[in-house]
């Protein structure tokens, strides 16, 4: 694998060729020459260098019946399997992870249940044990991982330290980037707030791909919001933009309290809440959802009034409620805000933060391989691995 702390090459020819190959299934030398405006010999030299690095493969031509004599066109393709990416959403009660190739194709995933009372040390042990099992199942070693992206609850600074976490107070002051870097010393590590990661994912491949400004809300047993402006989730001075969940006057704590009554299982304190398990047609669940929406409304109205976005995306544990959730929210915002705003459920469900962590890591890979990310790296907290 390449050194993930250094760019691909000091010259731009290899970077240009690789960038185009990453955007296509395969390209001929003629195609690459036209796209890069380089001469054919220069393209072939760059492609050969990339083949030696293991990033590109030559595509052998298929025999053609009746083809005239002559050498077939040389074609090359990006080897997405040359390296792998690990993404992890370190939730309060559920740690979810996936491993993907360098083009973002997910090849395997796993999750493990914990509780809010799990110690920080045990939280990391559980996560790393699960990661190692996931890699073993995918026939991968830690050294195969080029980049790691982590989403977490709480406010995270630019060095990967959790500055404040109301849901997991013991996590405050912990350097998540450093802990993950110890487990993956050859990889870059990027750490981001879960709501901001969710917003990143929505603009990458979710419900906000066609807008550049939005408010994304993670609705569930915890409430969080992220603001995206000009395609990049806005962090704010302290990384606390959108953190209105703890303001009692805005009602979000009351919304969370209401939803806790829907927790299922014989031992609800050890059972992760899953909105998909709730029948919102049930009168009791419907009443709880109405209380939740009523308590959510003031904070969401404030966010929308300040940002004036064209769209609000509702994700998180309650995304599966669909119109039962977004319909009333849409009506409240139409009544209380100066201008109408589109309100849609996340198309990513409860995968949004995990996919945002994946996008973070892909941004790191883009930086190393020399292609500017289609999603602004300012949208996440990128923490280079200094070890």
Image (spheres, grey):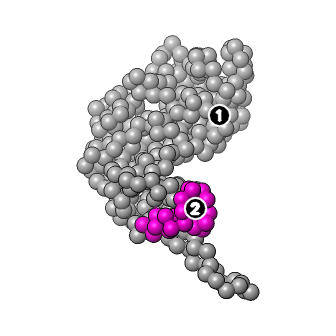
Magenta span: 27-49
- Residue 310, horizontal then vertical, whole percent: 67, 27
Q: Is residue 299 above or below residue 221?
A: above
Picture disc at residue 144: none
Residue furthest out toward the left? 387
Instruction: Identify which residue, 149 or 322, lies in the foreground.
Output: 149
Q: Is 103 situated left or right of 143 in this image?
A: right
Q: Is 306 situated left or right of 48 in this image?
A: right
- Residue 316, horizontal then vertical, whole percent: 56, 37
Q: Is residue 349 above or below residue 30?
A: above
Q: Residues within 10 Å of mark 2 (few under 14, many from 20)?
A: some
Q: Is residue 57 above or below residue 113?
A: below
Q: Is 37 included in the stretch rendered in magenta?
A: yes
Instruction: Identify which residue, 4 or 178, lies in the foreground.
Output: 4
Q: Quadrant of residue 320?
A: top right
Q: Nearer the viewer, mark 1 or mark 2?
A: 2
Q: Earlier in the sequence, mark 1 or mark 2?
A: 2
Query: Callout 2: helix, strand or loop?
Result: helix
Q: Which corner quadrant holds the N terminus?
A: bottom left
Q: Quadrant of residue 287?
A: top right
For the point 28% across and 43% down, the residue is 178
Specify the principal SS of the magenta part: helix
Instruction: Identify which residue, 83 or 272, lies in the foreground.
Output: 83
Query: Callout 1: helix, strand or loop?
Result: loop
The answer, for residue 247, to whether it is visible in the render is yes
Pointer 1: what residue?
211
- Residue 76, horizontal then vertical, whole percent: 55, 68
Pointer 2: what residue?
33
For the point 39% across and 40% down, the residue is 382
Q: Residues within 10 Å of mark 1 (few under 14, many from 20)?
A: some
Give me the C-alpha separation between circle 1 and circle 2. Answer: 34 Å
Q: Is 162 included in the stretch rendered in magenta?
A: no
């Amino acid at each position: 694998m390449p050194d993930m702390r250094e760019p691909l090459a000091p010259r731009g020819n290899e970077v240009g060729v690789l960038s185009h190959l990453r955007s296509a299934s395969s390209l001929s030398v003629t195609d690459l020459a036209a796209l890069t405006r380089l001469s054919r010999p220069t393209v072939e030299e760059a492609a050969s260098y990339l083949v030696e690095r293991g990033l590109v493969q030559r595509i052998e031509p298929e025999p053609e019946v009746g083809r005239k004599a002559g050498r077939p066109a040389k074609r090359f393709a990006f080897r997405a399997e040359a390296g792998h990416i690990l993404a992890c959403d370190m939730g309060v009660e559920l740690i979810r992870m996936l491993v993907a190739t360098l083009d973002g194709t997910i090849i395997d995933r796993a999750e493990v249940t914990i509780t809010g009372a799990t110690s920080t040390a045990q939280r990391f042990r559980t996560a790393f044990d699960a990661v190692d099992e996931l890699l073993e199942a995918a026939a991968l070693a830690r050294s195969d991982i080029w980049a790691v992206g982590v989403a977490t609850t709480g406010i995270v600074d630019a060095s990967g330290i959790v500055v404040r976490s109301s849901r997991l107070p013991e996590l405050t002051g912990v350097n998540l980037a450093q802990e993950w870097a110890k487990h993956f010393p050859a990889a870059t590590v990027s750490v981001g707030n879960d709501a901001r990661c969710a917003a990143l994912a929505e603009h990458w491949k979710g419900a906000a791909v066609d807008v550049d400004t939005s408010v994304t809300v993670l609705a569930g047993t915890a409430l969080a919001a992220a603001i995206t402006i000009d395609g990049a989730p806005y962090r704010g001075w302290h990384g606390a933009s959108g953190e209105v969940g703890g303001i009692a006057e805005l009602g979000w704590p009351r919304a969370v309290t209401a939803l806790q009554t829907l927790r299922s299982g014989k031992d609800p304190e050890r059972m992760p809440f899953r909105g998909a398990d709730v029948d919102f047609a049930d009168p009791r669940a419907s009443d709880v959802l109405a209380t939740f929406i009523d308590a959510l409304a003031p904070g969401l109205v404030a966010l929308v009034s300040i940002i004036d976005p064209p769209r609000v995306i509702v994700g998180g544990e309650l995304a599966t409620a669909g119109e039962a959730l977004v319909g009333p929210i849409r009506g409240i915002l139409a009544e209380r805000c100066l201008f109408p705003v589109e309100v849609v459920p996340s198309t990513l469900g409860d995968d949004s933060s995990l996919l945002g962590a994946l996008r973070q890591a892909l941004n790191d890979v883009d930086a190393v391989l020399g292609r500017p990310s289609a999603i602004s790296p300012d949208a996440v907290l990128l923490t280079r691995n200094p070890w």
